[in-house]
Image (spheres, helix red, strand yellow):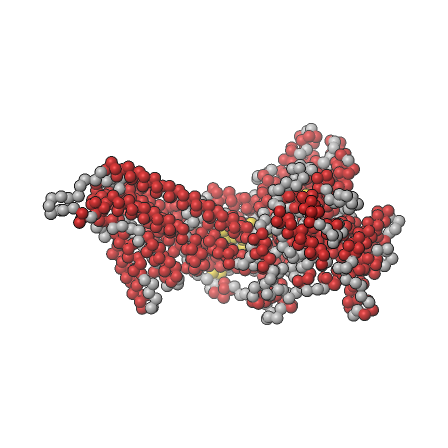
Amino acid sequence: MSDSVGGSRASGPHARHEAGIPDDAALALEKAAASFKALLNANHVDEFERATSRSVCADLNSMQARQLQLRALVNLKRVQMFLDGMNALQTVLVNLRVENTTEVNEKAFDHILEVYQQLGLQLPPLSQYMQLFEASRESRWCLVYIYKDVLEFHAIAYKLFSLRNPLWTKLHRATWKDLEPTFDHLAAALKLHADFIEKHGAPLHDRHGSRIDSGFGPGPIDTTATAEQHKVYETTYAEEQRKFKNAEETRRREQKNKILKWIAAPNKTEVEHRKHLQTAEICPENGRWLWRQHDEVSNWISEDLPVWPTVWVQGPRGMGKTILSSMVVRHLEKLAEDGIKVPPDSQVCYFHCYSEDPEFQTYLGILRGILHQLVWAAGVGGEPVSNNHAAILPLCDDKRTTSGGSTLTNPDTAAQLIEVFFEYNSRQYVVVDGLDECETLAEGASTEILQTVQFLNQQVLRCDELSQGQLRVLFVSQSTPDVRKAMTKIGIGPDAGEVILDPKDNLVDIGRWVKKTVNGELQRFNLTERQKEVIENHVTAQSEGFFLHASLAMAYLSKQMTKEKLFDEIKPGMLPKKLSELYEKLLEAVRTRLQERSEGHWIQARQLLGWLVCAHRPLKWHEIQAILAFSPDREDNPVDFDMRMIREDNIGDYLGSLVHVLPGDNIRLIHSTAKEHLVQTRHIKPEYVQCELATICLRYLSLRCFAAEDYREDERRNDIPHGYFSFQDYAMSCWFRHIVTVVQNCCNVFLDPSFEQGRDYTRSFSTALEMFISAYDADLKLLPDLNGLPDTASDLLRKDIDRYASLPFYGSLFRVWYHIFQHQNSPSEERNKVGIARLDAVLETHRAAIEKDYSPGDKTVNEDTMENYYGPNLFKCNRTLCRFFHHGFDNKADREKHVKRHDRPYPCKIEGCGFAPVGFSSNKDLQRHMRNYHPNDSDGPTPFLQMSRRTETARFQCTICQKSFTRNINLKGHERSHFGERPYACSTCGKAFARLNDCRRHERIHARRGG
């Protein structure tokens, strides 16, 4: 038997071929060997080709001797049966160099020995069946299949054990456990091969079954029977392979879906990104000036060693930075797809912050959005190690199952997983747009921004220590004080990675976009080329480089009815320069268009826009429909979705260009500036809308289905499919907020008795208060003797309410106001309730009935479904301050897991803290939260910034830009980037690199593709 292990690989298949092995079997052996060899890096290829069975045994003996000295023996004997089987097969045993990893992770070494033992038990003594292989050509295929199955295991093991030790330590336990089905499958496959060999080789192998000394040797093999049975064996093997592959893909797909569901990141980022790309597709050449004019961005995109791996692009509001950021993402993806300037295995993820939605304004929300994309990129087909992201899914799943909740609510957990993804990927780009949008948070905005910036920058520094340029982060935002402060703390400034955008750079792009839009949306006006040019020049010049202005102007011009009116609007001084005036004009155009259909269409559209602007949280579309379906004065039928809901096919057409309709149950305004400007128009008066919403909530909660003590179960069963409870989530959690807003900001609505509309609001609001108090008189707190209250409490209570003393509903409003005052100053456990005992009880009863008897797809009235009336998630959290109170879950189990998290023993000490609605599982986590979000109230020491390791250890400084490095080799590579020196060329395609390691990593791409 040959002593060569690695070296026999080239000669083995050919030697067998000369002895009669089938051509396709020989090719299969060569292909399997070549595929495995392609996985190895250059150093391991050399060691592999020099390895022999004797050298492997010598290495194992050395390892065992070293373990004996350390008193850390791990029963290395378990690998013996596998070695015996491989020697009998006369093929390759891969030297995994596991001695380098066992010193830091004995458990990992123990696990691989267990698998060697598991596989070795299934390997027969092949050399004893030589006569079978000589007599039966078909049986030689068993050797090919054994060879391939063994290499499959070693491909997995090599990929994992060749990781950096810190990364493998993080991945090992979860990944190895996840691979158990694969190892069981390989062991079963080896047993199938062994069973065939032993069955058909038994007559030749059993030397005691024949009389050699009497001249009776083993009889000839029935090759025809063997060939037939070999077909059955091959069919069985192929079927088992297929079944396992399908089962694994299904398991991994389910695993991935569970992880994504646990992360619970809304898909709005991806949806909005696709919308931005659709906008950009109108003019594909737009936006390229960003990386053509700014070296910081082009260097960040394409250089192997970027000067600034963290870049901040900042510019004024309305310039179109969000579209630009999406175009950067698309550009990176295209470069990676083509393999030009960017490695083809590069990963790109992004996040857009939105001021309207709290989920898109927090550190946790940003981390969840990034993690969602990293997990989403993982493929579920093929082997688990064939896709970088797929290899980390087991760790994500392990965190999911041990987190104790149905959703990811701990930013530390999200950060740990993202860190592993960043470390694993050879090139990772991250684009974060709109950090300034976080500043609309009532408190903690600076903390959210600072945490995000510091975490991502720390990851860049950490990855630079592993491989410079491995992770690159691009921030795109306005230069607000909080963002500027965060960037300054990480060293970003005008001469250090900051790019300041000039709106004038946008003018060419805007002109190009306006031209395309004129040829599209304005084509119906039968314009001449000269007329088109006039419009293009006027809108472009008027925009002054602000895309938002140009977009609103074109939306307004497209709403004109005649060509004459169109050109009237582009006369000098007619098209407004201010955004507020443009929004006014656009809203006026919507009014004109809808009034042509009927006055009712405009009134309803104005109501919808007012509700969207003034709601205390983003309204779901089914909740807007519920308001429309509610008619409190119709005692016989106060809620009627069937007759009153909007049946427009495209609500975006109905409300014009002012809203975006998102998939599912969501609707939002066109831009973050829309809200602040729409409330300044003459059509939407926020004070009146607030009074209207407060009145609606009070009247809705006074319905019989909520207030009547004798409300029957048969009534509830009848009311559910008619949508009676579709608005309860909003009304029960926000009714008191609207009352507070009315008391503090809306007094003028009622105080002008000469104003007819004011008198109408007074009557309706007064009626709503009376009905509400009548319904819940026993639950509302009685007014105390105000003289007996402390001066401070009395002053706070009466500060705003006394302005209503002259109004007829003052007494009723004061009673409700006092109840709200007491409720808002109660412990957080109480504030997480509706605040009225009967409403808390009926909410639980109504929800239980819906959960028990209905699903989103169930029919309600005619072709309407429960989802049309109640949204897609019917299982809700019972805490009003939790976002899952209205967002909900699609199954009961996830809701129950979530609710348990609210019972954690360490709640935030600051009453009303919106950054920790579920509390903490340990006091350590609580104290960290207090230091980050409430430093003035923290019991711990004053927080200070963690000093960067780079600051202390970076001894090698670039003489050109003064950037410092911890290793001289990184400095040399960096200095080459200044002069464009690329001394290391790829041996396959000739592409040059500044660093040898980058060149080797690139060459492995060719190896994986087969050259």
Q: Residue at x 32, y 56 (%)?
A: 117
Q: Quadrant of the C terminus?
A: top left
Q: Can you give x and y, in whole percent of width and height, for residue 814 in the image?
A: 81, 60
Q: Nearer the viewer, residue 671 or 669?
A: 669
Q: Can you give x and y, in whole percent of width and height, for residue 110 in the image?
A: 36, 60
Query: What is the quadrant of residue 968 in the picture?
Result: bottom left
Q: Residue at x 70, y 64 (%)?
A: 826
Q: Nearer the viewer, residue 553 or 270?
A: 270
Q: Residue at x 52, y 51 (%)?
A: 259
Left of 249 or right of it: where is 447? right
Q: Can you give x and y, in whole percent of width and height, for residue 932 in the image?
A: 60, 64
> With respect to residue 345, does 831 lie above or below?
below
Residue positioned most to the left? 214
Left of 98 or right of it: where is 21? left
Q: Residue at x 31, y 67 (%)?
A: 68
Q: Nearer the viewer, residue 642 or 458?
A: 642
Numbered-mark total: 0
Q: Can you give x and y, in whole percent of width and height, for residue 896 in the image?
A: 58, 55
> Looking at the image, can residue 133 be seen?
yes
> Looking at the image, can residue 980 be seen?
no
Left of 137 or right of it: where is 632? right
Query: What is the quadrant of residue 542 in the picture?
Result: top right
